[in-house]
Image (cartoon, grey):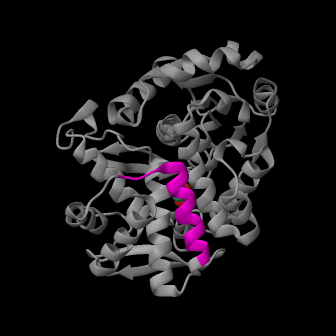
Amino acid sequence: MPQHITYTNQVGAALDRVLASTCCLRLFVLTDENTHQLVLPHIDSKALHQATEIIIHAGDEHKTLDALAQVWHALSDDGATRQSVLVNIGGGMVCDLGGFAAATFKRGIRFINIPTTLLSAVDAAVGGKTGINFNGLKNEVGAFAEADEVIISTCFFKSLPPKELRSGYAEVIKHAMLDGHETFGQIIEQAPQQLTLQQLEASVQVKQRIVAQDPHEQGLRRTLNLGHTVGHALESWAFQRSGLAGTSFQGSGIRASMPHGYAVAWGLVAEAVLSHMLLQFPSDDLHRLGTYVRDHYGTPGITCDDYPTLLELMRHDKKSRQGEINCTLLRHIGDPVIDNPITDDDIKTALDILRDYVD
Ligand code: GLY
């Protein structure tokens, strides 16, 4: 069954309604230092006034075991029981970490996600992937656990910097590519800030439909990895280049120096090139995507000297098998094919063509 999602700009009222129908003995709310200051005061909820607030540091570099332990401690010290509910208010980091804290505390308490970024609304808050970064690896430890309710409001997005909005929009483009020509045509012909609530809802539904059929990623859900083999390698490459790799930064060794969605946008182009080369994905759709990504996301700034590092990162990606690089590709818009083994030479060609589009 698809996860229950409420779309509303009356977030406080929606939360009170959900909690009124839940047997919740104690309410906890997880924020980071940004959402504590900028979002929580604007949620007009009676229930939240009674809640115990847990505030963690903001940023993916804090999606760590230390922060997780902080949440467990707060729940334990303030008497959380199996009947308690945790409300996660924030971006992907808060939803991922808070979801994992809830999934594991007393073997699982209920939780509600209120995503405050476009990226978390279309991705992290929905679908039940929770977790933390560990041992220098993103999302290395986690669990599948769906939020009991997700409350999505566009009112939080208005104050997002354009870069953050563009980052989330890359996942909207990915969902459109998985969905079909009509959606792709609409999404690719407007600027990220023109996204309507209806389009946002449709985008989330693409993910919901896939997750409902394959919640634990045995097959179909891997289609959601479109753009992410190359995308994750670019993200890790940017992190290494930032000079912080190998240092234990706040205990995780991970620092996000390239916005996730930007890496996904470039990854989508590279993987559309591979789709064209290997599955005859139409060149006009590739061209539309490449042009859009050039105009809205610019360039990742890679050169061919970076290819060996990028290939090595792709080989170590969770999605690769026994060192063989593996991608989800498309035959057509709306027609994905999972588990395509890719050669190094094909990746290099795809990166060359990506650079031809965006450099
Ligand atoms: N972010 C991809 C997934 O949830 O499967």
* Quarter the C terminus occupies: bottom left
- Residue 303 shows up from this direction: yes
Which portion, as a residue range, is magenta?
A: 284-300
Please give the name of the residue rendered at 39% of the width and 68% of the height, measured from the top-left corner. 319
* Magenta stretch prevailing secondary structure: helix
Name the foreground residue: 114 vs 19.
Answer: 114
Q: Is residue 21 left or right of residue 326?
A: right
- Which quadrant of the view contains residue 309? bottom left
Placement of 87 over or under 55, stated as above or below: below
Q: Position of residue 73 (x, y in %)?
A: 42, 23
Q: Is residue 289 magenta?
A: yes
Query: Residue lying farthest left?
Result: 246
Q: Position of residue 88 (x, y in %)?
A: 58, 32
- Which quadrant of the view contains residue 202? bottom right
Placement of 294 over or under 113, stated as above or below: below
Q: Is residue 129 left or right of residue 51?
A: left
Please give the name of the residue rendered at 81% of the width and 33% of the height, measured from the top-left corner. 21
* Quarter the N terminus occupies: bottom right
Number of callouts in the render? 0
- Residue 216 shows up from this direction: no
Q: Position of residue 261 (x, y in %)?
A: 50, 49
Q: Position of residue 98 (x, y in %)?
A: 51, 35
Q: Is residue 97 magenta?
A: no
Name the foreground residue: 114 vs 48.
Answer: 114
Placement of 345 over or under 55, stated as above or below: below
Q: Is residue 281 left or right of residue 299?
A: right
Placement of 180 over or under 70, stated as above or below: below
Please give the name of the residue rendered at 73% of the width and 19% of the height, measured from the top-left corner. 47
